[in-house]
């Protein structure tokens, strides 16, 4: 068991290395793939470690969740702000830049950016990245927040927390002229997180999650 645990740790670190190496080179799909494999091997290693130390199993699982949550936030940060792949400029440093951003990269009309790609015959790659990608980007919050924070185990507090996170992201994007500020991003991001939150509340799914991640608080 110890040998399997050590091998799983090594493989997890190896794929994490691939992820870090690909930050400025690989597509986000490949980065996500390596991140998921790294997390799977880490989970296996931590469960084996928990079996070796049964009295500390719940603590070990909690540590695993915090590690993967931090890893997810790092990936989300890179995905959202494109730090290693583009230049960011403080919006108030250039009046022309600010005017251009306000004119072309801000939308406060609900569902405009969601409906437009379908009515104006946008490519499917654009629809997948900009619509379904926004749904998926914050969906993991539906898993991590209820697992790690007791107040987020109820729908209303959870939704408010996710909405505040998205508002912070959108405001920061505005400050550093990265991406765009779009009310539809808020709608899609929150929707993705709430959908997963509700799926994980289904009794059968919840029982599976409880077996995979046995925490004393639950």
Image (tube, grey):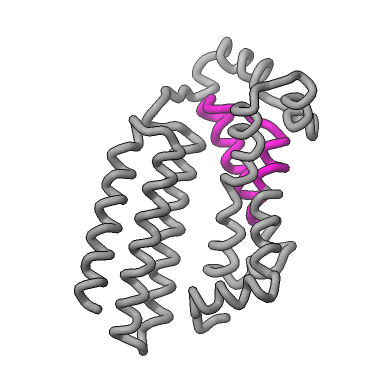
Up the image or down, 38 lies above or below 64; here it is above
Identify the residue at the far bottom of this view.
55
Task: Say left or right for 91 vs 160.
Answer: left
Quadrant in which the C terminus appears: bottom right
What's the residue at 76%, 19% (across, down)? Answer: 120
**Picture layout, residue 99 above or below residue 198:** above
Who's the residue at 72% across and 64% down the image? 155
Residue 154, percent across and down?
A: 70, 68
Q: What stretch is highlighted in magenta?
A: 160-189
Q: Does the magenta-highlighted stretch encompass residue 181? A: yes
- Look at the magenta stretch and give its main secondary structure: helix
Q: In this view, does 195 lie above or below 2?
A: above
Instruction: Classify residue 52 as left or right of residue 167.
Output: left
Residue 139, above or below 46: above
Q: The N terminus lies in which quarter of the figure?
A: bottom left
- On the image, the x and y values in percent for residue 17 come to 27, 47
């Amino acid at each position: 068991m110890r040998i399997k645990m050590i091998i799983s740790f090594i493989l997890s670190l190896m794929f994490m290395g691939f992820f870090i190496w690909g930050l400025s080179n690989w597509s986000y799909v490949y980065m996500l793939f390596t991140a998921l494999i790294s997390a799977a091997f880490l989970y296996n290693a931590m469960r084996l470690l928990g079996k070796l130390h049964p009295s500390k199993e719940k603590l070990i699982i909690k540590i695993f969740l915090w590690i993967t949550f931090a890893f997810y936030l790092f990936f989300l940060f890179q995905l959202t702000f494109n730090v290693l792949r583009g230049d960011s400029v403080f919006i108030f440093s250039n009046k022309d830049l600010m005017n251009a951003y306000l004119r072309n990269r801000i939308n406060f009309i609900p569902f405009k950016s969601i409906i437009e790609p379908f009515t104006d015959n946008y490519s499917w790659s654009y629809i997948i990245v900009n619509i379904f990608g926004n749904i998926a980007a914050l969906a993991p919050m539906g898993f991590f927040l209820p697992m790690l924070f007791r107040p987020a185990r109820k729908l209303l507090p959870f939704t408010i927390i996710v909405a505040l996170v998205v508002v912070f992201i959108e405001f920061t994007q505005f400050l550093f002229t990265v991406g765009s500020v779009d009310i539809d991003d808020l709608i899609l991001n929150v929707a993705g997180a709430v959908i997963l939150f509700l799926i994980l509340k289904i009794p059968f799914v919840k029982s599976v999650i409880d077996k995979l991640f046995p925490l004393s608080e639950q």
